[in-house]
Image (cartoon, rainbow, N blue to C red):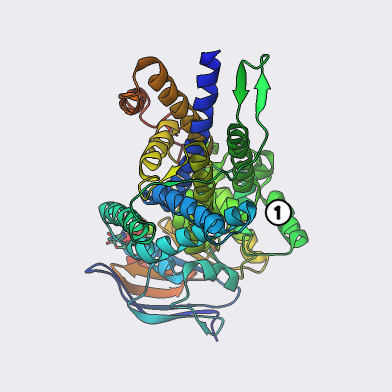
């Protein structure tokens, strides 16, 4: 059985239908890329997954439990961490306080301390700036903070919404390297990206989202060489 | 010596405004709404304390504790019943109008229960007064307690918000509700907690206000409530030190205006100062004018 199963998801904003019955699944240990043009419904998909937007129809099953109607604040405790689009770090709080909020639902102080060490090791920049207000970080650093914050919950799956958006090429490479490391350390990854080439190059499988529908899916490698994908998303 | 005497009265009145303003500012910062019924919770607190002492014969301390508990519960219930259902409403106006409605509801309930005639508040705070400058300046016990209470509450709240886990959750909700939920923060519970704290403080403010100006009617909370709102805006709404500084400045301006200019226009002076400050510094003294780097 898949770790995460999304079945026939329909989502509306008022009368506008953003998702028109999408289905996909993510297996334990995979890196799954969800690619698509601006406005295709990628963010909506992730926000519905973590309870920020209600689904009108369809179901989301995570580790055998139906989480379709679970409120957003209960999702992270179940093992799903969401790195939102635009990073959404708490700009008034320090880097350290942001990371602590990532571990908000965890109780064991010692284990939190361990996770903090791991995150600082993975993102040395964050440790250097731990007492700095998050709003004063550069875009790339904020992205690292958003990822570090998500990892502080010790998730079994991490969903990321366009982590490379607006970053300089150096940071983009760094972010993708970190995603690989996160995946290798055993965390399942669901990655939403407009940078399809990069996303497909690290993913196992991928889904292509087109105006609220999944138009294509398959092995990432195959999609990378698919003619229609190349034309639409890889700019070739 | 009269200058110092007025100053002390101003700081004392301002301390009460500051405590009320803290409630306004916290609720605004976290729930993003103006709770115009906040002033009336003060009145409810004062009535509960007075009734507990005079009718139920409870000790002053116990009566104050009861007042705080009842106001805390009242604040939480008001939020749950009146404001929460509107949280997803697209219009802030709906919430504002509801808040005004709740304000009238509390005033009219008090009218119904306690009547319209002014009650004289009993002395609750028995604290020795302080005589300085060979007897030329006397600071009443109530004044000392008021100023001390204000300082303690300010320091306590600042520590609570910055150093505790629920406090951090409040800051997170204040800044980005959705992101806070993704961290596992229960937004409704956090807003309830904010109302609880603000309303509990309102009971303390009611006690201090009525101890300094011992007449109590169902409308006692309305004007101080509005002035405390002005103080919160003056200091920069959403900011805890802003509420504090704004409250105290407002109290001092009001007392000086009354003493040196005219007691009739003292309130007008208060509002004039607000308008000038907002023209010069639209976000208030401690408001966040600077756009954060995104
Ligand atoms: N808050 C909203 N209100 C109304 N429509 C929205 C809202 N958010 C997104 N949409 C619409 O839903 C569709 C999908 O948006 P989104 O999920 O953000 O796409 P993507 O992340 O793939 O760029 C778009 O047509 C967008 O205009
Ligand atoms: Mg998006």
- Name the subunit of mark 1: A
Picture layout, residue B159 above or below residue B131: below
Residue A236 x/y as whole percent: 35, 56
Residue B242 x/y as whole percent: 49, 34
Per the image, the residue denoted by label 1 is: A116
The quadrant of the rendering that contains the C terminus of chain B is top left
Q: Residue at x 65, y 17 (%)?
A: B135
Q: Residue at x 39, y 22 (%)?
A: B258
Residue B95 x/y as whole percent: 31, 55
Residue B208 x/y as whole percent: 53, 41
Q: Quadrant of residue A151?
A: bottom right
Whether residue A87 is visible here, answered yes or no, is no
Q: Nearer the viewer, residue B154 or A154?
A: B154
Q: Residues within 10 Å of mark 1 (few under 14, many from 20)?
A: many
Q: Nearer the viewer, residue A182 or B141?
A: B141
Q: Nearer the viewer, residue B137 or B90?
A: B137
Q: Residue at x 56, y 12 (%)?
A: B1
Q: Is residue A29 left or right of residue A224?
A: right
Q: Quadrant of residue A1?
A: bottom right
Mark 1 CB within 8 Å of ligand 2: no
Q: Is residue B17 left or right of residue B115?
A: right
Q: Is residue A174 left or right of residue A60?
A: right
Q: Most extreme residue toward the right, as rendered?
A: A110
Please tell me how many numbered marks the rendered image carries: 1
Q: Find ligand 1 in the image and state its quadrant.
A: bottom left
Whether residue A14 is visible here, answered yes or no, is yes
Picture layout, residue B136 above or below residue B117: above
Q: Nearer the viewer, residue B173 or A232?
A: B173
Does dot 1 land on a helix, a strand or a loop? helix
């Amino acid at each position: 059985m898949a770790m995460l199963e999304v079945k026939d998801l329909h989502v509306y904003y008022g009368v506008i239908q953003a998702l028109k019955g999408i289905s996909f699944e993510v297996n334990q240990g995979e890196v799954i890329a969800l690619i698509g043009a601006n406005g295709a419904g990628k963010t909506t998909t992730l926000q519905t997954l973590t309870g920020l937007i209600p689904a009108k129809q369809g179901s989301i099953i995570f580790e055998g439990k139906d989480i379709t109607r679970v409120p957003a604040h209960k999702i992270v405790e179940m093992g799903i961490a969401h790195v939102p689009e635009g990073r959404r770090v708490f700009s008034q709080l320090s880097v350290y306080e942001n990371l602590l909020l990532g571990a908000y639902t965890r109780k064991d102080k010692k284990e939190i301390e361990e996770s903090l060490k791991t995150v600082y090791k993975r993102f040395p920049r964050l440790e250097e700036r731990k007492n700095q207000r998050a709003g004063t970080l550069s875009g790339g650093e904020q992205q690292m903070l958003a990822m570090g914050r998500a990892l502080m919950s010790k998730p079994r799956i991490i969903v990321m919404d366009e982590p490379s958006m607006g970053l300089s090429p150096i940071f983009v490479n760094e972010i993708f390297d970190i995603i690989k490391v996160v995946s290798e350390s055993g965390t399942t990854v669901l990655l939403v990206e407009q940078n399809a080439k990069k996303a497909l190059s690290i993913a196992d499988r991928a889904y292509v989202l087109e105006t609220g529908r999944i138009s294509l899916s398959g092995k990432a490698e195959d999609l990378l060489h698919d003619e229609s994908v190349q034309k639409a998303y890889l700019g070739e | 010596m009269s200058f110092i005497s007025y100053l002390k009265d101003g700081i004392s009145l301002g301390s009460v405004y500051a405590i009320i303003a803290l409630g306004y500012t916290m609720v605004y910062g976290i729930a993003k709404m103006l709770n115009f019924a906040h002033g009336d919770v003060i009145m409810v607190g004062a009535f509960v304390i007075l009734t507990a002492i005079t009718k139920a014969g409870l000790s002053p301390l116990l009566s104050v504790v009861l007042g705080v508990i009842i106001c805390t519960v009242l604040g939480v219930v008001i939020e749950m019943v009146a404001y929460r259902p509107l949280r997803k409403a697209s219009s802030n106006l709906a919430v504002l109008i509801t808040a005004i409605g709740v304000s009238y509801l509390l005033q009219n309930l008090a009218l119904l229960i306690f009547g319209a005639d002014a009650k004289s508040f009993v002395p609750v705070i028995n604290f020795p007064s302080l005589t300085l400058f060979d007897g030329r300046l006397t600071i009443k016990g109530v004044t000392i307690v008021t100023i001390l209470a204000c300082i303690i509450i300010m320091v306590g709240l600042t520590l609570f918000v910055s150093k505790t886990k629920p406090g951090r959750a409040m800051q997170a909700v204040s800044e980005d509700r959705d992101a806070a939920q993704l961290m596992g923060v229960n937004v409704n519970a956090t807003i309830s907690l904010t109302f609880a704290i603000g309303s509990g403080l309102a009971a303390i403010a009611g006690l201090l206000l009525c101890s300094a100006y011992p007449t109590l009617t169902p409308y006692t909370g309305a004007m101080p409530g509005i002035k405390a709102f002005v103080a919160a805006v003056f200091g920069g709404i959403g900011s805890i030190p802003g509420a504090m500084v704004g409250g105290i400045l407002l109290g001092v301006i009001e007392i000086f205006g009354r003493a040196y200019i005219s007691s009739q226009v003292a309130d007008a002076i208060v509002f004039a100062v607000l308008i000038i400050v907002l023209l010069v510094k639209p976000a208030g003294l401690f408001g966040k004018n600077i756009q954060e780097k995104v």
